[in-house]
Amino acid sequence: MYDLIEQARAVIAAQLATAPRVALILGSGLGALADELEQAVVVPYRAIPGFHEPQVAGHRGELAVGVLSGQPVAVLRGRFHFYEGYTMQQVTFPVRVLRALGCETLIVTNAAGGLRPDWQVGEIMRIADQIFLPGMAGHHPLIGPNDERLGPRFPAMVGAFDPELASLARAVAAEQGLTLREGVYCMLAGPSFESAAELRLLRGLGADAVGMSTAPEVIVARHAGMRVLGLSLITNLALPDGPPANHEEVLAAGELARARFAALIRGVLARM
């Protein structure tokens, strides 16, 4: 894997004047933030060794590198999902490449179902912790031989989400008059949405939001020594007695909340 990471890094770095410091992964319906980059260099995923074309609506499939709120950033417009048939190593490969490019911080976003009946669609949740159910079932991005050049064999995941970035996000949200929820994000493999029984189980486990991404990317980022801020946009309420979820409402909610979400991320970047 190390050689492929270096190949991908070299292809991207050859097109850049400045190395990025912050990596952003933009989830379903949230990719428009990349349009705000200054001095942007855009590299299609198909041009990067080891990258693939996303197959999900709302995921464009390109890497944009530039400046946002004064910070040199690399923005992944679209991610790979385990349910698309990729391995966890393939899902997380872009994080490895961004770390090799020089990114020290990862801001990872997603669209998630809210498990709390008192929450509202369009609210943003800071991920305080995560439950990675596929990993607990044996689908883990760090399974296999460990390359010490990439990170330690047994990385700790307690405190995976950086406390200083958490405090910064709270402060920016307060200044903007934005309600910032905090809670536990649970990842399921997908692609089916959750049954009523599964939703009750997740609440019993202590989860506040559920989705089909993010957790393996966080693990690999921490394995690589990156600081992590995780943000979930609540695009639907995933309640046992509620209406069935669908991907169209996820994209619609992302569109409606795009300005608030982008303002929060810009504010965090400006104060880093």
Image: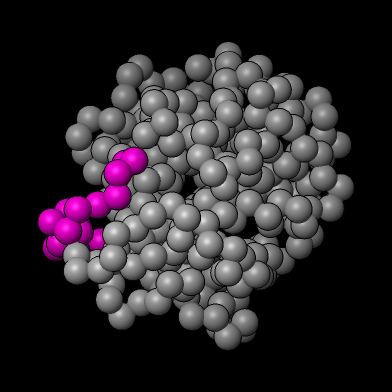
Span of residues in magenta: 190-207
Q: Position of residue 199 (x, y in %)?
A: 20, 59
- Percent across and percent down for residue 129 are 34, 58
Q: Residue at x 46, y 32 (%)?
A: 91
Q: Which of 267 and 105 lies nearest the eye of the viewer?
A: 267
Q: Position of residue 131 (x, y in %)?
A: 27, 51
Q: Which percent across, then down, holds residue 213?
A: 41, 45
Compared to 175, does 134 lie above or below?
A: above
Taking the image as shown, residue 168 lies to the left or right of residue 41, namely: left
Left or right of 132 in this view: 23 = right
Residue drawn at x 37%, y 46% as measured from the top left: 212
In the image, 218: left or right of 77? left
Q: Residue at x 44, y 64 (%)?
A: 235
The residue positioned farthest toward the top in the image shown: 3
Q: How many marks?
A: 0
Residue 107 visible in this rendered orientation of the protein:
no
Q: Is residue 211 above or below residue 119?
A: above
Where's the C terminus, which quadrant? bottom right
Q: Quadrant of residue 19?
A: top right
- Which is more toward the observer, 252 or 180? 252
Q: Is residue 199 magenta?
A: yes
Q: Is residue 246 magenta?
A: no
The one nearer the camera, 226 or 242, is 242
| 64 lies above or below 55 | below
